[in-house]
Image (tube, grey):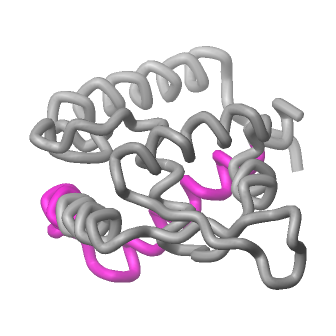
Amino acid sequence: MKDVSTDSDIRGMANRLYLLMVRLRRLKFGLPFPHSIQIPPALMVLIDVIATQPGQSIIGIAKHLNLATPTVSIGVRQLERENLIYRRPDPADGRSVQIFLTAKGKKLYERLCSYRLQKFEGLFGGLTPEERKTLLDLLERAVEIAEKREE
C-alpha cells in the first residue's frame, strides 16, 4: 500500500511534534530529576543502569548504553567519589569489577523514580491505561526505528 501522506502533511506533523516537545520542556518533563539533586544527567543514566542491572561491569554498562568504555569509566569514578556506587571484584573474572549502588545511591535512585512517576502521572493521568500503553509502544517503536537508521 502506498503512503498517502503529502509533504505538507509531513511538515505539519514534524512541526506539531516539535511544538509538543517544547511544551514538554516547559512542563519540565524532559528533566530527569529535580534541580535539588546536584548530579549531571549523564551520570543519572549510569545510576539507572546500575540500579536496574546491579553487578554489571564497566564494559557491560558501556555496551548497554552504546558508549565508549573510557566514558563510562570516568562516570563511574565520579559516582564513586560521590559515594553513590561501589566496586566489587567479579568472582568469575579476577580482572573485572562489578558495580553496585551504595545505600546513598539507592536513596537517590528512589527519589528519582518517585519524581519520574509524579511527572508521568501529571502528563498521562488523563489517559486510560490502554491509551498510555499504546502511546508509549508507538513512541518506543519510532525511536527504535530512528536508532537503527543512525547505525
Residue 69: image location, x then y, percent: 78, 40
Image point 58% across, 76% down: which residue? Answer: 54
Q: Is residue 67 above or below residue 55?
A: above
* Viewer-nearest residue: 32 or 46: 46
Answer with left or right where residue 63 lies relative to residue 47. right
Q: Is residue 122 magenta?
A: yes
The answer, for residue 18, to whether it is visible in the render is yes
Q: Is residue 8 above or below residue 119?
A: above
Q: Is residue 127 magenta?
A: yes
* Viewer-nearest residue: 144 or 93: 93
Figure quadrant of residue 114? bottom left
Image point 74% across, 48% down: which residue? Answer: 62
Q: How many marks?
A: 0
Residue 72: image location, x then y, percent: 66, 41
Answer with left or right where residue 135 lies relative to residue 10. left
Residue 136: image location, x then y, percent: 48, 63
Figure quadrant of residue 5? top right
Q: What quarter of the picture does the C terminus occupy?
A: top right
Image point 72% across, 72% down: which residue? Answer: 89
Answer with left or right where residue 93 lies relative to residue 91. right
The answer, for residue 117, to whether it is visible in the render is no
Answer with left or right where residue 139 lies relative to residue 119. right
Residue 24: image location, x then y, percent: 26, 36
Q: Which residues are magenta?
A: 118-145
Image point 36% across, 33% down: which residue? Answer: 40
Q: Is residue 33 above or below residue 40?
A: below
Q: Is residue 81 above or below residue 93?
A: above
